[in-house]
Image (cartoon, helix red, strand yellow):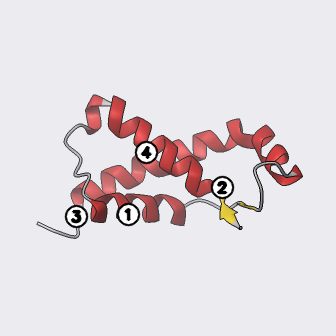
Amino acid sequence: MVLNYMEVCVKDYLEKTLNSDKNYANICTCPQCLDDIMAKSLNSLKPYYITSKKGEVFAEYSSLEKQHNAEVITAVINALEFVSKHKNHN
């Protein structure tokens, strides 16, 4: 199995933000908007593919995760704000 680990990071941060940040309490969380937020976030980040959480590549990426967290946070916040202003539905 090949996985873009950035997708895991974006999904985790998006869920945390929507569940705990009152600034985003009114964001639409329908499947279309969530997919749009994920796609917009991921399109602004460099993908990082891994094959196994037990593998050497995962261990290497985990050591860089703090550096990537700032990029993920920025990408998700920008996507949340963009999608909330430009919904694909009424």
> Which amino acid type is marked by label 1?
Asp
Q: Give the residue displayed 61% in from the left and 55% down from the top.
A: 6
Question: Residues under labels 4 and 1: Cα distance?
Answer: 11 Å
Secondary structure state at the residue bearing disc 2: helix
> Which amino acid type is marked by label 2?
Tyr
Residue 26 shows up from this direction: yes
Choose the circle earlier in sequence order: 3 or 1.
1
Q: In this view, does 27 lie to the left or right of 19?
A: left
* Residue on which the image places disc 3: 87
Q: Give the residue displayed 22% in from the left and 70% down from the top.
A: 88
Q: Position of residue 70 (x, y in %)?
A: 59, 40
Q: Where is residue 5 in the image (x, y as percent from the top left)?
A: 65, 55
Question: Residues under labels 3 and 1: Cα distance?
Answer: 11 Å
Question: Residues under labels 1 and 2: Cα distance?
Answer: 17 Å
Secondary structure state at the residue bearing disc 3: loop
Q: Nearer the viewer, mark 3 or mark 4?
A: 4
* Residue on which the image places disc 1: 35
Q: In this view, does 90 lie to the left or right of 22?
A: left
Q: Callout 1: 10 Å neighbours few (<14), some, many (20+)?
A: few
Q: Callout 3: 10 Å neighbours few (<14), some, many (20+)?
A: few
> Mark 2 and 3 residues: CB-CB less than 8 Å, in contact?
no
* Residue on which the image places disc 2: 5
Q: Callout 2: 10 Å neighbours few (<14), some, many (20+)?
A: some
Q: Callout 4: 10 Å neighbours few (<14), some, many (20+)?
A: many
Q: In this view, does 42 lie to the left or right of 31?
A: right
> Which amino acid type is marked by label 4?
Leu
Above or below 29: residue 50? below
Choose the circle earlier in sequence order: 2 or 3.
2
Residue 47 lies in quadrant: bottom right
